[in-house]
Each structure stands twice: as C-alpha cells, then as structure tokens.
Image (spheres, rainbow, N blue to C red):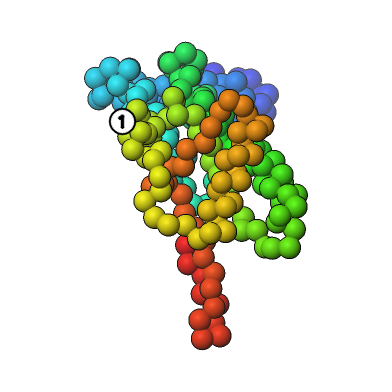
Amino acid sequence: VDSDDDNDDNDPKQWKPDPLDSMFAKTSIFKRNSDTIGLLVKIFGSREIFVEEYRKLLGHRLLMREKNFFKIDKETEYLELMKLRFGDESMQDCQVMINDIINSERDCKNIQTIIDNKMEYKDIIIPSLDVTIISSQYWPQCQESTFEKLKKTLPYKLPNEIEKLFKHFCETYGEIKKPREIYWLSNYGSVDLEFELNAQIIKIK
C-alpha cells in the first residue's frame, strides 16, 4: 500500500460507506434482488410459472390484510423491481391489481358520499361500508369457474339495513361506472361488530 500521500481523505479510518440513495448503492441493491429473483426462476422452472405464482401471491397479500389495507407502498416497490427483471408487459396483470386497490379507496369514498346524501337515509345511522373493487379478468381469485360460483346469491341472509346498503352501493356504482357491474365475492372480507351485553360493549371482527 502506498502511504506516501499525506492527504487525510485517504486515511482508512476516515472511510464511510456510500449513502443509500447513491447510484452505487442502488445498483448493488438491484443486483442482489436480481440475483435472488434469478434463483427463484430456476427453482420454479420457467419465468412464466414464476410470474403466475407471484401474481397469485400478490392477490392473496392484497386482499387478506386486516390493517392498513390501502397502504401498498411495499407491494408497489416490489412490483417495480419485478418489472425491471421481466418487463412491463409480463407484469401487466399485477399492475392492474395494484391500480384496483388504489382506485377502490377513491371510488368507495365517492359512492359512500352519494349514498349518505340520499334523502331516505337522512334520519338513520348508516353503517360504514369499505369495498375493494377488483377487475375480474386480472385477479387469480376471479378465475372463470370460481368466479361464476362466487358471484351468485350470498349464501347467508344479511340484515335488512345492510342488504339495502349493498343494493344502493351496486346501483350507485352502476350509475357512475356504466356499463360496469358489481358482483359480491362472499368468501372475502370481514365485519366489525359491536354490541352491548349485560352493560358491556363487546367488539368482534
């Protein structure tokens, strides 16, 4: 090692790693992620099978969360890495799924506002209804054979107020999104219940 240079900048004790936002650091992170993805592709046997399995995993991850449902920063970041590896066209279905979650938050709020302003609901308390509207052609949960079964009449009887709210939601969506329609997927979603028993408030999800 040449130690004749007295410049303090070359002192090994003064060395600091590149910041995370530097080009070198980003390149290193992408290279590691790319190597990992390449290994997974080999395990699955082909890029097509890997992309399809990733689509199924993404669909499950997006729909089954119970907290921070509309916060999908991580999923969006992972998808961008996948696009760099496989191209935009291969990941088109996954991008539609991400967009569905983003659009659902906005559309649901707009529809709920319209329902709240309807005259017939002025004097009653309207239960809150958060709906995730997904595109049936792109989600693995909506494969043709399964979707035809799921979109049939709900297998249980809803309370009258809730059934009316479901109906108004479908009608309002149809009015602002013609010619689209909504079919309820009865095996997804959850309900927050709060009731009083022996002077105690009990909450159930």
On the question of residue 153 being in view, the answer is yes
Q: 151 or 120: nearer the eye?
A: 120
Please name the residue shown 52% across and 25% down the image. Answer: 96
Label 1 CA crowd tier, 10 Å (few <14, some 14–19, many 20+): few
Mark 1 lies on a secondary structure that is helix
* Place of residue 76 in the rendered image (x, y in percent of width and height, measured from the top left): 54, 31
Would residue 65 be found to the left or right of residue 107 on screen? Answer: left
Disc tally is: 1
Q: Amino acid at mark 1?
A: Ser
Q: Residue furthest front?
A: 120
Please name the residue shown 45% across and 29% down the image. Answer: 136
* Place of residue 170 in the rendered image (x, y in percent of width and height, measured from the top left): 57, 40
- Residue 20 vertical placement versus 5 (above, below): below
* Place of residue 30 in the rendered image (x, y in percent of width and height, measured from the top left): 48, 23
Would residue 25 be found to the left or right of residue 42 on screen? Answer: right
Query: Quarter of the image holding residue 57?
Result: top left
Please name the residue shown 67% across and 32% down the image. Answer: 176
Q: 109 or 37: nearer the eye?
A: 109
- Residue 49 vertical placement versus 175 (above, below): above
- Residue 204 vertical placement versus 163 (above, below): below
* Place of residue 65 in the rendered image (x, y in percent of width and height, measured from the top left): 47, 47
Q: 183 or 86: nearer the eye?
A: 183
Please name the residue shown 56% across and 85% down the image. Answer: 199
On the question of residue 36 being in view, the answer is no
- Residue 194 vertical placement versus 81 (above, below): below
Tag 1 residue: 145
Would residue 107 be found to the left or right of residue 62 on screen? Answer: right
Q: Residue furthest bottom?
A: 198
